[in-house]
Image (spheres, grey):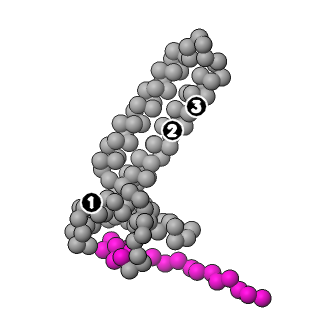
Amino acid sequence: MIANERQYAITRTELQRFEQAAEEQQQHGPSEDIDPRIGKAMVDALLSQAETLREELKRYEDLRDGRISKRELEGLRDLPAALIEARIAAGLTQKALGERLGVKEQQIQRWEANLYPGVGVERLQEIADALGMEVRETVSYAVSS
């Protein structure tokens, strides 16, 4: 997941590298000592990785540019990614979110880099509130018979 403009720029550069490597492999083919099937698998792997990067870039752009405004959660494990996406959709940098919460930018970076590990429910709610994020999820209880 791309979480900031720096990662966005790095991902764009990596996409160009994968596309260029795939193009070179397609034009020149594998060396004589490599089975053509392995050469094709190498190209397919490069193209697959390029497609993954394209999808990540598009998701970030859509969030940043306001084309995505919500996310369906499948469970609580989806909440950290939703918090990151909400920050991007709100047009806030990690620094700006940190200022709203009274913490340093580096703390936000650490939390987001690892998808908010060990962050308590109260702090997660503070983050959601700072982002103007509304969370609604239905909880289904196991019914004993």
Say whether disc 3 or disc 1 marks the residue closer to the N-terminus: 3
Return the residue at label 1.
106
What element does badge 1 sit on?
helix
Instruction: Specify the label residue 49 is tagged with.
Output: 2
- Residue in the image at 49% along x and 78% along y: 136
* Gap between marks 1 and 2 measured at Cα: 29 Å
> Is residue 78 visible in this depiction of the protein?
yes
- Name the amino acid, label 3: Asp
Magenta-drawn segment: 123-145
Place of residue 68 in the rendered image (x, y in percent of width and height, measured from the top left): 42, 61
Label 3, residues with CA under 10 Å away: few <14, some 14-19, many ≥20: some
User: In the image shown, does 12 or 64 lie closer to the viewer?
Assistant: 12
Q: Please name which of the two marks, 1 or 2, marks the residue nearer to the observer.
A: 1
Magenta region's main secondary structure?
Answer: loop
Say whether disc 2 or disc 3 marks the residue closer to the N-terminus: 3
Task: Tell me: residue 33, above or below residue 46.
Answer: above
- Name the amino acid, label 2: Gln
- 134 vs 145, left or right, is left
